[in-house]
Image (spheres, rainbow, N blue to C red):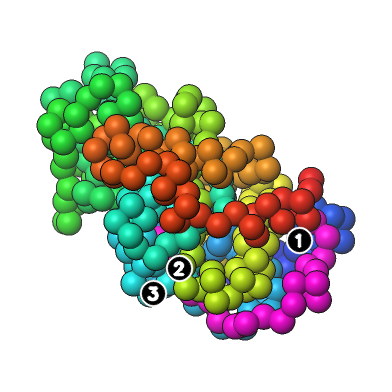
Amino acid sequence: MKMIQDRRRFLTTLTAAGATGLIGPPSSNAQDGRLETTSIRIAKIAGICIAPQYVADELLRAEGFTDIRYVATNAGVEAALSLARGDLDFTANFAPPLIIPIDAGEPITIVGGEHIGCFELFAKEGIRSIADLKGKTVGVQGLGSSQHVFVSTMAAHVGLDPARDIYWVTSSSIKPMELFAEGKIDAFLGFPPEPQELRARNIGRVIVNSVSDRPWSRYFCCVLAGHRDYVRRHPIATKRFLRAIIKATDLCGTQPEQVAQRLVAGGFTPRYDHALQALKEIPYAKWREYDAEDTLRFYSLRLREAGMIKATPNKILTDGADWRFWNELKRELKS
């Protein structure tokens, strides 16, 4: 009964938001044209920072989608490769794990930004900066994961060789966060709801927060990407998907309590308090202030520094980005 009440409350919020202009004017479906397809497959990962795509169902249905499926995958390069294989139509992902397969020629097109910041790097006492990670053990979900790629880019940015100077620890039986909590590794990079749990348990200290620490806080963390063929063959569906996610992003910033309830009710996370804390800490409402193209340029340079890609930023943008819909919707959905 509570789940039904929460869903009704959320739908009421959507209706009220549309009426007050909170999430922009009603969708201009007639102006867009006829949907080429009403089916869409979206990635589902363990992190809840990409909450907009998890609470966008009703907005997607309002855009005309009737077959909305969430496909389980792991974050990072694995999610990007699932997209490239055609297992997904769209995903929100940390930008670098999308850039890496684009550099390798995979059919991925980044179409816009989603939110700024969500990663927090926890470390033991005595480790105060990225440079202090030299010779230390860092736990990540896997090589190629968002965590591994982000720490690698940060390390290269301060002159470390991430392949030689850091000892990467992965585990299939014990989560890296628990290895850090048990004192078995020196540092751990987490994304919601992991940082919220570690802080609640008073474990470790944060040495980098991508919400507030420059240069990382100046760029999108997660961006939205589609399979190249879907974007090319279904431009109207692509624009309507992006519109729904942008509106859901605004709701995450303005109605965090309702969104947190929806995340728990939908089985995306078990803890309401951690979800609410994450939603309040991530500046979802600031998406209009950031430049998705600058984000790709910045991270392409960082990945080149780390030796993880060969292409120039211009090559990545030419091969793997299409800003048509993003730019149109930024004009349409003015605050």
Q: Residue 320 location, x and y as percent?
A: 45, 56
Q: Residue 231 location, x and y as percent?
A: 54, 69
C-alpha distance separating marks 3 and 1? 34 Å
Residue 262 appears in the picture as rendered: no
Q: Which residues are magenta?
A: 24-45
Q: Residue 50 location, x and y as percent?
A: 51, 54
- Residue 103 horizontal side relative to residue 212, left or right: left
Residue at mark 3: 86
The 10 Å Cα crowd at callout 3, few under 14, some 14 to 19, many 20 or more, is some
The 10 Å Cα crowd at callout 2, few under 14, some 14 to 19, many 20 or more, is many
Q: Identity of the amino acid at label 3?
A: Gly
Residue at mark 2: 227
- Residue 192 horizontal side relative to residue 166, left or right: right
Task: Out of 314 and 104, give the one closest to the viewer.
Answer: 314
Q: Residue at x 12, y 31 (%)?
A: 164
Which tag, 2 or 3, sits closer to the chain's start? 3
Q: Is 313 situated above or below 97?
A: above
Q: Residue at x 34, y 72 (%)?
A: 85
